[in-house]
Image: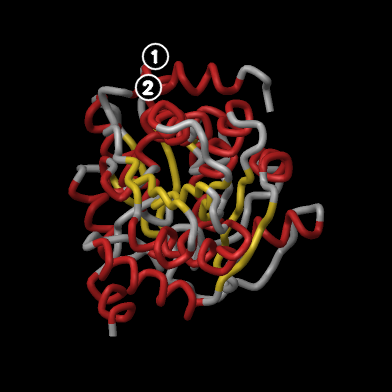
Amino acid sequence: MDSNFHKHVDEALSRISSLIRKTPLQYSPSLSEKTGSEVYLKLENFQVTGSFKARGAANKLMILSKDKPERIITASSGNHGSAVANAAAELGLEVLIFLPKTVSPAKLNKIKLFGAEVVLTEADGRTDAETAARQYAEENQLPYLSPYNDLDVITGQATTAAEVFKDNKNFDAVFIAMGGGGLISGMGGYLKQKISEIRVIACSPENSAAMHHAIEAGRIETIEHLETLSDGTAGALEFGTITFDFCKSVVDHSITVSEKEIASAMKDFIGEHQMMIEGAAGVAIAGFLKENEKYRDKKVLIVICGGNISNQTLVEVLK
């Protein structure tokens, strides 16, 4: 990663400030007492569109808008689509969003509310929708906006870390959910350049842990994906994604958590903190709880990456 990456991130934060929300960095008394760590939460569930994805979408669209494109093509499992649709509406840009047929109703409805045009593909997962979107973009000579395989998107996601660093500079470890790797690449890259000794812990659902297995194997492989509460991180990786090398360079430790661990972490968090979170955020919390013995008396950051959850999933988690 470029040694000046942190400077590019700071520039991006200034660029997108009118399109995003500075989210709270909040101390968690309950998690701190429970684990013996000093735990802070970066609350991206309060972000525009309810997810950190607003940052990467805003950064990329602001850069693309300079060329006045006729239309921008993207694909999403939900949160990226909402983020792109919202930023495009703010900037007066037209977007076409390809979605897998398995997209959650809550996320599909949110995307439509922003006025974006949607194509529901026959794809079961994120990667097939991305393939269809990229092919359409190439055939029609239109710009394609990847959810994670794009340096401008990664730089935008990293502004989450830039806000954290401005508020509090002394974390020993950060726990981040890992799907395509855009968020952890960006945040990890920024924080490593600012706090060299910080440990970056990647957390993935056992049922769909493509990047985790890629890091272990040293290459991107085709693996089986099962249903998971963490739909925002689910799915295969695009072969050749730049996030693979970035993740290898910034991730100190990668762990997986079960669906039971995710659900338990979400249920306890919602009850103790009185705020809504989605499955991907539950993955990061569950990852910390699984590893917390290693971080007693340490200052820990957990990234609450989003709060978009359907009523059906919420009922399932809370029962």
Q: Marks 2 and 1: which is nearer the front?
A: 2
Q: Quadrant of the N terminus?
A: top right
Q: Is residue 230 left or right of residue 208?
A: left
**Residue pointed to by mark 1:** 66
Q: Is residue 127 visible in the rendered structure shown here?
A: yes
Q: Quadrant of residue 26?
A: top left
Mark 2 residue type: Met
The residue nearer to you, when weighing 309 against 99, is 309
Residue drawn at 44 percent across, 60 percent down: 280
Above or below, 179 against 6 in this view is: below
Q: Position of residue 101 (x, y in %)?
A: 40, 66
Q: Are marks 2 and 1 in contact (CB under 8 Å)?
A: yes
As drawn, the residue found furthest toward the bottom would be 319
**Residue pointed to by mark 2:** 62
Residue drawn at 38 percent across, 43 percent down: 52
Q: Position of residue 172 (x, y in %)?
A: 57, 43
- Alpha-carbon distance for marks 2 and 1? 7 Å
Mark 1 residue type: Lys
Model colouring: secondary structure
Q: Is residue 211 left or right of residue 7?
A: right
As drawn, the residue found furthest toward the right would be 218
Q: Position of residue 242 (x, y in %)?
A: 66, 38
